Image (cartoon, rainbow, N blue to C red):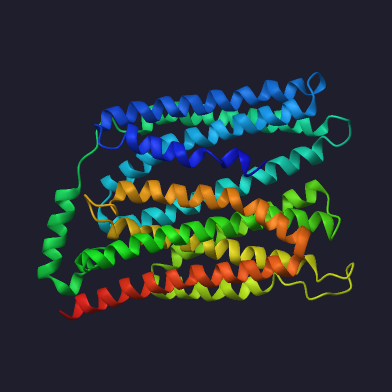
Amino acid sequence: MVAASQAFQPFLALLSRWLVIGQSYQYQRRFMLICLGAEAILTWLMAPVLEACNHWSDQTVLYLLVFFRAMTGGVIMLYGVPLACCVYDSAPLEDRQSLSIRYYLFLSIGVCLGPVVSSVMLSLHQGGAHQACFTGRQSISILGFVWSAVALLSTWLLPKEIEETHEKDKTHHDEATGENSALSLAQAVQRIPVQTRRALVISAVLFSAERSFSIGAIEVATALLLEVEYSWSSEQIGYALGVIFFITAVVGGVIALLRRKVSDYTLMLSMATVSITGAMLFIDFGGQEKGHSSPWLLMVADVTVYSCMFQLTAFMEGIATEAAVPGTACSLENYIVARNLAIQIPRALGPPVARGLIDLCGRNTYAVLQLCLSSVAISGVWYAANTARSDAVVGKQL
């Protein structure tokens, strides 16, 4: 069901590309505000569905919730494409890497709050035949208020006009050509051959696909393993996932601070190495707790792979937005759409594949899958980091 709610969302990203990209900013702004309002309305509509738990069949309630979940996710795809394009396109090239890192930092904070809030509500409202429905209504109400606030604030926060930065970026790039000592990574990326820039964009899209599949599998497999192998309750699992997401947010903040003293190249390869090591910890080495290794070992594996992959996505996206080639298949607009497709489709496939592997072949087969995914993803990180770094070094020597 988790996969079903995400199945058609990629098609709405393509639809958004066709409806919005190329239109005036005023048109895009109105489109985004309408979608934000629709997001709030669709979220509120889930509350009466949960209210009807006592009167409708469980199957009817489940299908309606999946439908509304798919619709809300689809609306996010509709306005997410023009919003990301406007943000990146209006930012100077040298700011896009930092912008991407900040975006994923705040995204990890938001992801952290969801399971924690749900677990707190489950703990506060224990007992009763319809505990899940009551907790669900409370969670949906909070989410409805959040989306309503976002829709209202967006009417004020979204500027009525934005300044085009292409010419400004071109001027900065030309100035950098004559001042090689001040050449930044973003300006250096712009100097490499177009074919290499396209390869960087494609590698970022492929990394997003691999990372999304891995993260989708982690979220479902962790909950399944903690419940089946270690008999953890729903509240405990929610808190455990919240801890994983919280540490991911902390890692994002630390990485943002370290960028002031450590190069992006070093940070990217360090996180790549840690994620490979963490993936090995998914293996069930056996032990005293019901014949399985400690659940905390599983948690350590989740934290290292999840947090490193999450932050590496920010670096890869920053490189891709800097390397995008206007007017081609690897333009910024096409990259944003391709990135959304690469996130949603594998993320929908990850949960059923992970659950199927664990049920049919056991936990260690799932561990091998995660190790393979991490290895393939890291090869893309290594290529992007080395390409950008070597170009910057060459630029400073010219």
Which residue reaches farthest left?
A: 178
Q: Locate the C terminus by quadrant.
A: bottom left
Above/below status of 368 relative to 212: below
Residue visible at 33% across and 35% down in the picture: 18
Foreground: 127 or 65?
65
* Residue 320 percent location from the top left of the image: 34, 59
Number of marks drawn? 0
Q: Is residue 258 above or below residue 101?
A: below
Q: Residue at x 29, y 61 (%)?
A: 198
User: Would you say 378 lies left or right of 17 here?
Assistant: right
The residue that appears at 23% across and 68% down in the rendered structure is 188
Give the position of the N terminus as an image quadrant. top right
In this rendering, the answer to whether 234 lies above or below 130 is below
Along the line of sight, which residue is nearer the eye, 143 or 377? 377
Left or right: 292 in relation to 205: right
Q: Quadrant of residue 256?
A: bottom left
Q: Position of residue 133 (x, y in %)?
A: 77, 30
Residue at 55% of width from left, 31% of height from top?
Answer: 71
Q: Examine the rendering and report whether any part of residue 255 can be seen.
A: yes
Q: Residue furthest front?
A: 360
Q: Identify the residue at the far top of this view.
A: 55
Up the image or down, 172 lies above or below 289; here it is above
Q: Position of residue 122 (x, y in %)?
A: 79, 39
- Where in the figure is residue 289, as x and y percent of width and height? 88, 68
Residue 268: image quadrant is bottom left
Toward the viewer: 163 or 279? 279
Q: Is residue 36 left or right of residue 244?
A: left
Residue 262 visible: no
